[in-house]
Image (tube, helix red, strand yellow):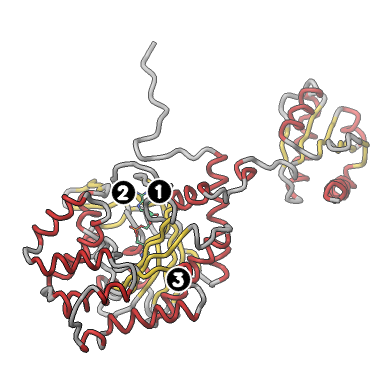
Amino acid sequence: MSKKLSTKPLRGMEDYYPSDLRETNWIIDNIRDVADLYSYEEFESPSLEPIEIFAAKSSDELVNEQSFIVEKKKGEKLILIPELTPSLARMITAKRQELKKPIRWFSVPTCYRYERPQKGRRREFKQINMDILGEDSLYADLEIFNIIVDIFSEFGATSEQFQIYYNNRRFIDSVCELILNVPKEKIPLVYKILDKADKMEDSEYEKYVLDIFQDEIIIQGITKLKEATSLKDLLNRFEDISEEFYGTIGYKELTSFIQLLEDAKISEYCNFSPGVSRGLDYYTGIVYEVFDTGKENIRSIFGGGRYDDLLTLFSDEKITGTGFGMGVLMFSLFLKTYNLIPEEIREPDYTDTIYIASINETVSGYALKLAGMVRGEDFPCIVDYRFSNLKNQLSKANELGVLIVLIIGPKEMEQNEVTIKNMKTEAQETIKISSLIDKIYDIIDESAL
Ligand code: HAM
C-alpha cells in the first residue's frame, strides 16, 4: 500500500471545521456590530505586498525573522502580510484627495508570522483592525479606547478581567531626553528595550541593555521606566526634574489623555504603564496593549497606537492615524477563560430548515421543484436523496432538530399537494402547494409561542 499523506495542517496553521468557524464568525460579527456603532467601514487589501512597505517602518525582526517571503522572480521580494497597517497606509494615500477625513476603517485580514507556535500565537491568524486617520486630536485615541471597552463589554467582560495598558512614545522621548540624557538617535533603542523586557529573563535583559548602553544612569533610568506603576510613581523615582520636562508635548499629551479617560469614565479599564512601548517602529504617540488581568492568557490580546509618519512612505503629505490590531484567536481564548462564549454557538441550528422526504425516486423532480420554491422564500432547505425508507428520513430530520418536514409521494405529486409535518407536535396534514408557504409561517409562529 502506498504511504498516505498527512491530514495535519502545517505547523502553526489551523483548520477551521464548521463548528470552529461558527464560533469565530460569531465573535467577528459581534465586533462588526460595534464597528457599525462607531461608523467604521470595512475594507480589504491583498495578502501579498512588496516587502519594502513593511521593511521601512514596521520592525526589522518582523520582516527579517518573522515573515514568509515569496520570491517568484529574481530581484522581486513579496511578503505575506505580517500585519495590516502599512497596507492601510498605502490604500489611504492612494485616494487621499477624495477620501473625506477623518477616515474610519476596519478590516479582518489573515496575517502571517513565522513565530514559534504557542498559546494564542499562530503562523497564520485573523486580526481585526480598526483605525481612524486624519484626526490629530487625542479624541481619536480616546475613541479607539472607547471602542476597545465596548468590544469587551459587548461580550460581558468586566474591568476585573481585562485592562488597556498605555503609554505615549512622545512621553518616553521627553523622559529620555530631559531626565535620562539619552542621545536623540538612541531613543528608538529604548523603545526596543522596553518592548523586549517582558519577554526576557532578568539576566538576559541586563546583558541586552548593557550591550546597548554602557551608561549606568541610563540603564537604571530605563529600569525605573519599566517598573513604575503610575505617573506619580515614575516621577518620584527621579530627582531634580526640570521645568522644561513639564512643558514638553510628551508630558502634556500624556496628562491630557489621562484626564480625557477620566472624563469619559473609562479610567477603570485603563492603566498608564510606562514600560509599554510596542515593537513596531512607526508609532509616535499614544501606544497600548490589552491584557487579560488573570494568569491564563499571558500574551497581548490587542496592540495599537498612533502613527504620524507612516503614510509619508507613499507621499509627502502627512496624514496621522491611530488604531489597533486584535488577534481573534487571542480574544477567543480570553472569552473562553471567563465562560463568555455560549456553548450553543458551536452547534448548527437547523430549526428554520425545511426537510424534504420522498417516498420513492419517481417524485425526485417534484422534490427539487418544492425545494426551489421554499428556498425562493429564503428558507434553507435540505432534500433527502435516499428516496426510500421514510422512517429513516424522518429520524435524520429529527436528529438535526428540524421543525418542518415535507413528505411527498406519487399521490401528492399528482394532486399538486404536499404533506407537511410539524416535528414538534407530530401533527401532519396534506395541503395544496399554493398554501405551503403560509402554512410554513403558521407552524413557525406557533412554535415560537
Ligand atoms: P501587533 O501588536 O503586532 O500590532 O499585533 C496585534 C495583535 O495581533 C496582538 O495583540 C495579537 O492579539 C495578534 N497577533 C499578533 N501576532 C499573532 C500571532 N502570531 N498569532 C495570533 N495572533 C497574533 C499590529 O499588528 C499593528 N499593525 C496593530 C495596529 C493597527 N496598530 C495600529 N493600527
Choose mark 1 or mark 3, whichever is in front: 3
Q: Mark 1 vs mark 2: which is more N-terminal?
A: 2
Q: Which mark is residue 306?
A: none
Q: In this figure, which residue is indicated by the disc labeled 1?
A: 125
Horizontal side, residue 420 vs residue 332: left or right: right
Between 56 and 439, which is closer to the camera in this rendering? 56
- Residue type, numbered disc 3: Ile
Would you say the beta carbon of the disc 3 residue lies within 8 angstroms of ligand 1? no
Between 195 and 418, which is closer to the camera in this rendering? 195
Count of numbered circles on the image: 3
The residue depicted at 38 percent of the width and 40 percent of the height is 13
* Label 3: which secondary element: helix
Would you say the beta carbon of the disc 1 residue lies within 8 angstroms of ligand 1? yes
Q: In this figure, which residue is indicated by the disc labeled 2?
A: 113
Q: CA distance from mark 1 to mark 2?
A: 8 Å
Q: Are marks 1 and 2 in contact (CB under 8 Å)?
A: yes
Look at the picture and state if 284 lies above or below 211. below
Q: Mark 2 vs mark 3: which is more N-terminal?
A: 2
Q: Name the spot of residue 330 as percent of width and height, x first.
A: 43, 50
Q: In this figure, which residue is indicated by the disc labeled 3?
A: 144
- Residue type, numbered disc 2: Arg
Q: Mark 1 vs mark 3: which is more N-terminal?
A: 1
Q: CA distance from mark 2 to mark 3?
A: 25 Å
* Label 1: which secondary element: strand
Horizontal side, residue 7 vs residue 286: left or right: right
